[in-house]
């Protein structure tokens, strides 16, 4: 039995990723930083099993991803993972509520125990938590960038243990959120709001692996890895957030980034 949530070993992708290895603890919030084109998004896609590496292995809990059928991979993604990616893949022909419901409805297909009404209630609750209640019927073009990003986080959380509770046995209750630049398109205030939401979700037990260019965002994480030319060439351990330490953490991150050649 592996005690880690995630284990990445010598992951390589022709020309892009070069023997990347790292581990993630359960409940950890880990940021990946590095210059544009260094391979951060590619790494996220490969760790999530959405792309095939040229070499190396990824274990999620005790399961090696590459050895699984597409079907099994899709199942793990649907039941245990959430995605907030750069191109957010929200459907333009659906309203915000239906977009949020999409993965949960998929995950409940075939032997699912939750009714549409129950899922809808969970979606509305999540929207309330993220302060976007009232936007259910809007099209994705009719909300602000920050609101859309929060809707995207709602959607990515719809398969979390909290929401699908009762469907799993205790040992299977884990959730890993992948986020690629979750605050990338946002102004300072909206970015702070989204980060607050992510930190809260993490405190409630969701592990988060995120890519960010923003040192303030990274300073909210437990640990940061620095990727350069497809290789991990440094790390900074910050530990869980403590009240009143925000400035100090940000300074540490900025100093470290300078040393990394940022
Ligand atoms: N599907 C692909 N086929 C070939 N090359 C690709 C593909 N996707 C990305 N690349 C290349 O791989 C490198 C890493 O890209 P990636 O998107 O992972 O960078 P990144 O670190 O996320 O950058 P950014 O900060 O700009 O988002 C880049 O040189 C990019 O052009
Ligand atoms: Mg990227």
Image: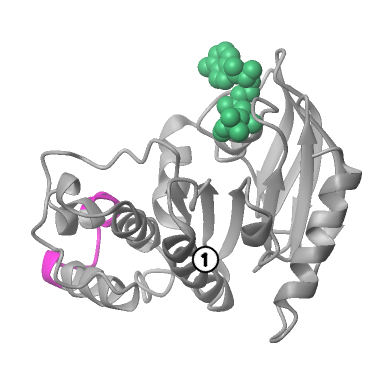
- What residue appears at the point 71 percent right and 44 percent down from the top-left corner? 33
Mark 1, residue position:
195
- What residue appears at the point 49 percent right and 51 percent down from the top-left corner? 182
Q: Is residue 59 magenta?
A: no
Name the spot of residue 80 as percent of width and height, x first: 47, 56
- What residue appears at the point 54 percent right and 67 percent down from the top-left corner? 206
Q: Is residue 44 left or right of residue 98?
A: right
Q: Is residue 90 left or right of residue 220?
A: left
Question: Would you identify the image quadrant in which residue 203 lies?
Answer: bottom right
Residue extending farthest top = 15
Residue extending farthest front = 188
Q: Read off the magenta span.
A: 102-117
Question: Would you identify the image quadrant in which residue 57 lies?
Answer: top right
- What residue appears at the point 39 percent right and 62 percent down from the top-left corner? 157
Name the spot of residue 6 as percent of width and height, x first: 69, 52
Q: Is residue 188 left or right of residue 139?
A: right
Disc 1 within 8 angstroms of ligand 2 (CB): no
């Amino acid at each position: 039995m592996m005690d880690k949530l995630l284990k990445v070993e010598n992951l390589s992708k022709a020309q892009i990723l070069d023997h990347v290895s790292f581990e993630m603890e359960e409940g950890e919030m880990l940021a990946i930083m590095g210059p544009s084109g260094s391979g951060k998004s590619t790494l996220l896609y490969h760790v999530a099993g959405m792309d095939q590496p040229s070499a190396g292995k990824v274990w999620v809990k005790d399961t090696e991803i590459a050895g699984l059928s597409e079907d099994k991979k899709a199942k793990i993604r649907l039941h245990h993972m959430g995605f907030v990616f750069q191109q957010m893949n929200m459907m333009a022909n659906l309203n915000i509520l239906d977009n949020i419901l999409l993965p949960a409805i998929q995950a409940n297909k075939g032997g699912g125990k939750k009714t549409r009404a129950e899922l809808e209630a969970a979606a509305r609750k999540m929207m309330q938590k993220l302060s976007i209640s009232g936007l259910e019927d809007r099209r994705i073009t009719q909300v602000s960038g920050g609101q859309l990003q929060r809707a995207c986080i709602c959607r990515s959380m719809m398969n979390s243990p909290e929401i699908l509770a009762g469907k799993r046995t205790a040992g299977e209750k884990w959730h890993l959120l992948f986020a690629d630049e979750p605050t990338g398109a946002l102004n300072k205030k909206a970015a702070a709001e989204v980060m607050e939401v992510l930190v809260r979700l993490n405190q409630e037990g969701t592990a988060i692996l995120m890519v960010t260019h923003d040192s303030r965002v990274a300073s909210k994480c437990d640990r940061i890895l620095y990727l350069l030319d497809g290789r991990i060439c440094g790390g900074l351990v910050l530990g869980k957030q403590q009240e009143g330490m925000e400035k100090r953490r940000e300074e540490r991150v900025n100093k470290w980034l300078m040393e990394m050649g940022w």
